[in-house]
Amino acid sequence: MAKTLFDRIWEAHVVREADDEPALLYIDLHLIHEVTSAQAFEGLRLAGRQVRRPDRSLATMDHNVPTTPGPIEDPLAKAQLEALRTNCAEFGVPLYATGSGREGIVHVIGPELGVTQPGMTIVCGDSHTSTHGAFGALAFGIGTSEVEHVLATQTLPRPRPRSMRILYVGELPFGVTPKDVILGTIGRIGVGGAVGHVLEYAGDPIRALSMEGRLTICNMSIEAGARAGMIAPDDTTFAYLEGRPGAPKGADWEQALDRWRELRTDDDATFDTEVVIDVAELEPQVTWGTNPGMVLPVGGVVPDPAEIEDADERAAVERALVYMDLEPGVALRDIALDRVFIGSCTNARIEDLRAAAGVVDGKPNCDFAEPWLTQARAIVSYTVPKVDVLVSGIFRSQPNAQPANLTVGTNGASRTANYQMNPAQFLAATGVALRPGLAQQAVDLLAPGAVYGERIYNTDLRMAKVLRFGNKRLNVGFDLYNLFNANTPTTYETVFDVATNGARWLQPTAVLSPRATRFNVQFDF
């Protein structure tokens, strides 16, 4: 009888299967993190049970680890991480703790360490466990009670899902990425289009993807409602795994390759559902709304609810437009970006970060923080359309430092003003021309609650529209050379309150060494 990739893996792992009952599956790998495991370990403790197969379990500190250096300040996050450390030590579960060099996002470290392998059943208390299906594994997320069941028995009762194949044909156009492929797929079948199914992604465009691209595709299977997503392993898979710490070695590697090459769908196998997508018709995709199914090509426009016949869908679009503060008919290309988030388990591999860096590399409007801003983690300037801009009071140092000088400049010309002066004096000293009738407004907005020489900060600035620069660059800089103790690094809080059309803010904090003498941030308009 012809079999699919899913059939082969499922049937190889069934411990017990009876009519009208969920099958009992053996689990090859249980990935654990701090959020969904604490109650599961406590359940074992109360029942006097041990972890059945610690060698088939692997824990990492993931969701609550901050992206900035220093101690964890959130008490709940700290408690969950400490509970994971205690539980793993008590029950003998291997833990990649923060600082071990192998910790990280659970769906990233599994592949990178080579513990995710073809033919496995893999579970984790996280919905995006489907990521691991890129290696030809059956991987799915589970809840806390199921985490306890796997810890205690290394098995899991599971009803057999239906099967769906998404067959891709054609060639990817320039600029269309794996993320665009899966978003375009979800836009086609909907966020509920794969409910109750395990997806198999197939076709030449899938085989042409790197492992990183395949991981992105399988990761978002859940956004289509699927139980899991899978891609048959091939030479690309094997080349990625070879030599990694968790991968087989020597003769075991050759034997593993023989097994893995059998993990495929027979030519005459059938699926419960089949979908064919021509990737040549895809463009880069943009999600405009509140779920991944609200997606359009980048050349599209925000939809008009009045043109949608289905009442439920129309209501959903109306709610999304309100939440996103968008108007129907607006071209997606014309929507300014406030922030660009790069990361998460969908696209947080080093290859993804390199791809993002390649986009901004060499672009004069994408200026990164200077290397000596030791806590900097992101771009500190960005490009927006022509806007009205107000730069308000910006500096506070500690302890007892002299006031800094602020430099405001456009197109290479600049003036300097000391922040001990009041707002009217500051605006006059900088020499930046205000539009007619706005000088008094600027003074009134800046004045309430300002503490000159210490910090100028006012929450009413969001709606201020004061300085019109057009397509120019606004340079904001601090002369810091007279503020340092000669031997001691000092922390300076630098708060940039930039109101652009009433909405955009940037608030970096920098730890500067005594060697640093200048701090500059640029905004392009």
Image: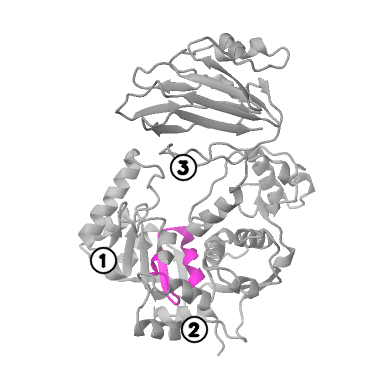
Residue in the image at 45% along x and 14% along y: 453
Tell me what residue is drawn at x 35 percent, y 79 percent: 249
The residue type indicated by label 3 comes to: Arg
Circle nearer the N terminus (2, 1): 1
Q: How far apart are the two marked residues, 2 and 1, measured between alpha carbons?
A: 32 Å
- Is there any visible trace of residue 457 in the rendered image? no
Magenta region, residue range:
113-137
Location of mark 2 (residue): 261
Q: Is residue 399 above or below residue 88?
A: above
Q: Relative to residue 111, is residue 20 depicted above or below? A: below
Dot 2: few (<14), some (14–19), or many (≥20) neighbours within 10 Å? Answer: some
The residue at which mark 1 appears reads as 51
Q: Which residue is mark 3?
A: 377
Observer-nearest residue: 479 or 106?
A: 479
Q: CA distance from mark 1 to mark 3?
A: 39 Å
Can residue 126 be seen here? The reply is yes
The label number, if any, that marks residue 220 in the structure image? none
Percent of width and height locating residue 285: 67, 54
Residue 265, magenta (yes or no): no
Q: Quadrant of the C terminus?
A: top right
What amino acid type is highlighted by mark number 2?
Answer: Arg
